[in-house]
Image: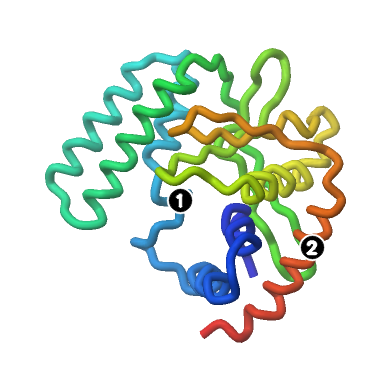
Amino acid sequence: MRITVKGLAKFMTSGAATQRKILRDFKFPDPEGGVQAAYYAEARRAIAEYHNSGNDPSVIAYEVETLGNKAYHASGRRRTRFEHNIRALQSYLENFGHANFRVLSTPSLALTHGNVVVSAIPDLYVRHQGRKKLIKLDLGTKAPDTKLVNIILQVIYDAALGDGSLQANDVIYLDVPRAKAYRGARIRTRLRTEIQAACQNIEALWPTIK
């Protein structure tokens, strides 16, 4: 059974009914659903291309124009998704477009507890100021819960522990619309215990999700 790090964090910060819905969405995914990683796919790809180009703003401008044309010819949820990707790109360019990131090949990270595999793939893996950084992008309109952010940072850091060159503060959560950067912390024993317990709960609940 597989779940994303964002899905795990939402599971851990939600009530029982919402937890079951989260698991149902992962067990029976809706291709047109609102899972953020897929929802903002165009924006995430354009952000990586922007930094690969040496921060050429025309990369973002071209993607915004392309998405604008798609939005014009779309309707309903598809149109809204394109419009949100445009907003996300404009926010990123304004708030973090100055960062001199050299994009590296993204590692396929995961954290496993029992039969639960938590995908912890960063949105950007970069070299910045002489150090490697694992970056998770939040492009949503709603400000994230602090505990949710801490869970995501912890899981990504623990999944990357095999890389001895990484420190906890090399794992970064960028809240793009609100121009905030959160960094990981090494010593969170209680949170690690809570993450393990949540995975055990997911393993127990999974067969009951219909």
The colour mode here is rainbow
Considering the numbered disc 2 on the image, is that residue within a helix, a strand or a loop?
helix
Spot occupied by residue 193 in the image (x, y as percentages of width and height)? 83, 59
Q: Residue at x 81, y 35 (%)?
A: 163
In the picture, the disc for residue 36 is 1
- Residue that badge 2 annotates: 196
Q: Residue at x 50, y 28 (%)?
A: 179
Label 2 crowding class (10 Å Cα cut-off): few <14, some 14-19, many 20+? some
Q: Nearer the viewer, residue 18 or 79?
A: 18
Residue 77 in the figure: left or right of residue 166 = left
Q: Nearer the viewer, residue 13 or 110?
A: 13
Residue 197 in the figure: left or right of residue 60 = right
Q: Quadrant of the N terminus?
A: bottom right
User: Farthest residue toward the left?
Assistant: 73
Q: Residue at x 75, y 47 (%)?
A: 159
For the image shown, how many numbered marks are present on the structure? 2
Spot occupied by residue 183 in the image (x, y as percentages of width and height)? 69, 32
